[in-house]
Image (cartoon, rainbow, N blue to C red):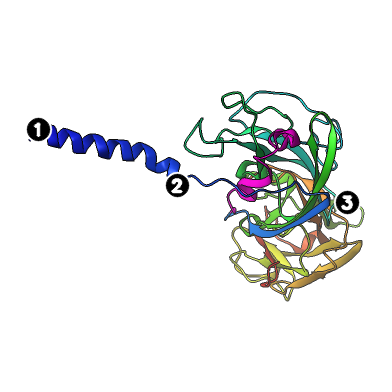
Amino acid sequence: MKRRVVFVWMVVSALAVVVPRAFAQRPPQMDPPTGVITQDIVMSWDRSAMPGVIEVWPRRTLIAHDHLDPAKQYGALFLTCASATDSETGRCAVEDTHASTTGVLSDIQTKFVEQRTGQRVDISISVGTFRIESSISCGSDYWNDSIHSAHSSYGKLCFGEPPAGSGGILSVLSSAQQRLTAGQWKGTLELRLRRPPAEHLATYVFNFDFTVTDHDAVSIYLPAFEYGNAHVNLDLRYDPIAKMIGGRKDVDMCLYDGVGSSSEYLGVTVRDAGPHPSGGDGFSVWHPDTTGDESERVDFDVLLDYAGNRRRMRNGVEEQLHGVDSTALRLVKLPKLDQPVYCVPTPLTLLTPQFPSSSKRQGVYSGELKVELRVPAVRP
C-alpha cells in the first residue's frame, strides 16, 4: 500500500516538472522592421490623477526572431540614439556598449517643450531589451526574463547557443511625468535599431503629445506675500502746502490658471470685504471707531494692469481678461509646486484720490479686499 502511494506521487511530481515545458510557446518568426516606424502617443491628464506608468512598448514587445538561422543575429539587436550629448531627440549611447548589465532599464533623457511658453525640460524615458532563447533548455520559457541594456548587443549563451531573437520595453515612469507642469508638452524620441557590429536596420520615432492640467493649483500669486495674507499700506502722503492727503500703492500680482496659461479668459473680481459698506462701486478703509459717518471713511480705487491696459475694478463686479493664450507671461515658483510655472502678470494699483486733511477724523484706517479668480468651466 505504501509503495503504491509513493509510486503515484512520483508520477505526479514528474508531470509537474514536464507540464510547463509543454505549454511554453515559441515566439513567431519575424524579421526586423526597415525604414522609419512612427508612433504617436497622445494623452491628457490632471496632476491630481496621474496615469501611472505609460507603456508605449509593453514588456516583451517582439522586434525580431529567427531560431533557424543564428547568423542573422536577431538575438543581438540593440538601440542607439542620434546623439550622446543632445537630448533634442533623445540622449544616449550612439554605438554598441557591449554592457552585460541586466535587470535595469536604460534611461534616455528626451527634451519636451511646452507649446504655449516654450519652456523646456528633459524627461527620462525608460527603455530595455529582452532576449529570446533558441530553446527552452535554460528556463521554462523561450523568453529570457532579464531586462538587458537597450544599447548593448549582449545576450547570454544557452548551452553555447546565442539568443535567437529580441524584444523590447519602452515606458514613461510616473516619476518622469511629475516633471511636467500644466500645459501642452511635446517631445520626440528617435531610436536606431542596430545589428552588430554597427548595421542600421530601422529608425523608431516616438512622438509624444501630453496635455497636462493642474486644476488644484489655480492660484492668485502675490510675490511680496507668499506665505500669508497681504498687509498693504496705502502709502498716503500729506501735502502741507495744499493741506491735502492722497496716495498710491502698487501690489504685484500674477494669476495661474492650472492649464499652462492657455485659458480662454480669466475672470477677476475684487470685493470690499470690510465690516462696513463702501461708497458706491469703489473701495474704502474706515476709522476703527467709526459711526458710519463719511468723515470716518477714506475711499480709494483699485486698478488692474493687464497686457498693457489699465482697468478700473468695480466692487464685486467680475472683469474678464481675454487673450490669455497670447499675452506675455512670467516664470514663477509657486509655494505649493515643485516646478516653476508661468503665470499671467496682473499687477494692482491702490489709488487714493486727494482729499482735504481736515475732512477726515484723525486715526488709523483699515479695511479688507478680497481678490477672486475664476477660470472657465470647460477644461482642456
Q: Amino acid at mark 2?
A: Phe
Q: Are marks 2 and 3 in contact (CB under 8 Å)?
A: no
Magenta residue span: 50-76
Q: Are marks 3 and 1 in contact (CB under 8 Å)?
A: no
Q: Amino acid at mark 3?
A: Pro
The answer to whether residue 146 is seen in the rendering is: yes
Which percent across, then down, holds residue 242? Answer: 91, 57
Q: Secondary structure at mark 3?
A: loop
Query: Dot 2 corresponds to which residue?
Result: 23
Q: Nearer the viewer, residue 268 or 60?
A: 60
Which percent across, then down, holds residue 86? Answer: 86, 35
Quarter holding the C terminus is bottom right
Say if the magenta span includes residue 40: no
Q: Mark 1: give few (<14), some (14-19) or many (20+) Cα within 10 Å.
A: few
Q: State how far apart marks 1 and 2 are (Cα).
A: 33 Å
Q: State how far apart marks 3 and 1 are (Cα).
A: 118 Å
When asked about the image quadrant of residue 131, the answer is top right
Query: Dot 1 corresponds to which residue?
Result: 2
